[in-house]
Amino acid sequence: MYSCMKRTIDLKVKPLHLYVCEKYNPGPVSCCVVFISYSGIATMGGICCAPCHPRKNPRVADAGARDEIHTVESPTGRFLIFANPNSGEGKSVAVFRKRLKPELVKNNIAYELIVTTHAQHAFSVIRARNDLHEFNAILILSGDGLVFEVINGLVLRPDHDRFFPHLPLGIVPSGSGNGLLASVYHTKSYPLKGNEFLKQALRSVSQVDATAHIVSLTHVETDNGENTVSFLSIGWALMADIDIESERWRRPLGSARFTAGAVIRCINLRKYRAKLSYLPSTETSESSVNQRTFPVFERELTERTSKCASSSGDTINFSDYHVKPGVPKLAEPVPDNWVTIEDDFVLFYAVSISHISADGLFMPSARLNDDRLYLTYILAKEMNSSVKLLSFLTKIEEGTHLDSPFCKKVPVSAFRLEPIDTGSYITVDGEVIKTSKIQATATSLRTAVIA
């Protein structure tokens, strides 16, 4: 039996119609049909069948997916490659075999391909390998989720200081996000849409003159004592709900799932109470304007990391990398020089780079090598219109949403978010984090991305 809903939203220019029909089956699986149209013309649609919980979608592996190793005499370099057969539209392995592999072979680049089979697969591999110093870069065919696994696997190794930023990441966009790669390409005015985005990525990672660009990382602390590293965003409330609740439409809609999720969430607008504390950033360091790069194949990783190898063997102490000294641990009180707000929020989002997706220019002023984070939030008392909020979200593609008077933007060195109401997700780089509160701090820790 199908239950259908139609909503019309007047965006002043032309009306937007949303159709959502869901078939409720006995058991854990539900099916839905989603259509969004402008002026009677269907512009986006999809059909999906998925478990009701958005994070428990069945993983449908590529039947032909398998690991492989390619060796050559006197190679230009060597890559460790991860391909996620379930990311985005599920085409990452096919993209590797048909488009990337021929270019690597042509340019005499050796590689080892690992096709991931489960969540945290790449994380476990990265933590366990004892030969990472033999690779010039790690290539990732997926979205930002697999990038998150790789970076956090590296940072938790006892020899972490050998790899940041000396072991660069090459990203071939195969997911529905790809905000990190889009941010790097934005600095070079590379195309960010459609097949041109993918073609540029394939060119960038397979050329013998490949160059890596330095990108800042953020220290994230949760209430269970776990420390992670973020390269993109920390979300809660509206943005996090859209990201996670639209997971069920990942296959049929791809990146358009965010649009469908935004419409649905704006129609059913929520407010969330929380205490937000932050340390304002008032200084502009040299790293905010100077973008550092290095050639991927000029030297082997062993040579690039020889100076820092002697300090290997210790668990990372994140406070050594904090841009501002004296940031307390999450369990400690907030200092007097922090600003604290307790209120009802509609939106909270913090980013460290410009793009949250290939078509999401969230913070135009952000630089790859910034020494700060950028908070954005909307208070419920300043937002009483679903239409205005949806208009705000649609403007993210062009980066003009920050002109909205109800949206607050604050550059910070650190912040702490303590939700009082339940019912929303806390996300780091699009991944759900199980914690009742979270703290993030800008660091001098850097990774590198090939572009």
Image: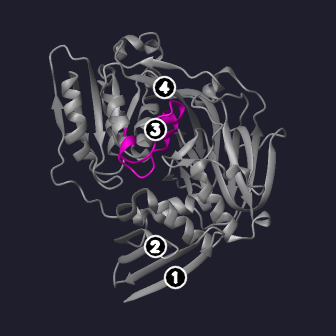
Identify the image quadrant of the C terminus. top left
Q: Is residue 350 magenta?
A: no
Residue name at image x 55 percent, y 43 percent = 355
Q: Is residue 188 magenta?
A: yes
Mark 1 or mark 4: name the one nearer the start of the chain: 1
The label shown at residue 181 is 3
Mark 2 or mark 3: name the one nearer the start of the chain: 2
Q: Which residue is mark 4?
A: 213
Q: Quadrant of residue 48?
A: bottom left
| Category of crowding for the residue at label 1, using alpha-carbon neighbours closer than 10 angstroms: few (below 14), some (14–19), many (at least 20) | few
Q: Which residue is mark 2?
A: 41
Q: Which residues lie in the magenta part?
A: 172-197
The amino acid at mark 3 is Leu
Mark 2 or mark 4: name the one nearer the start of the chain: 2
Query: Residue 329 at what x, y percent from top left?
Result: 67, 39
From the viewer's perspective, is the residue at label 1 or at label 4 nearer?
1
Query: Residue 116 at what x, y percent from top left?
Result: 28, 46
From the viewer's perspective, is the residue at label 3 or at label 1 nearer?
1
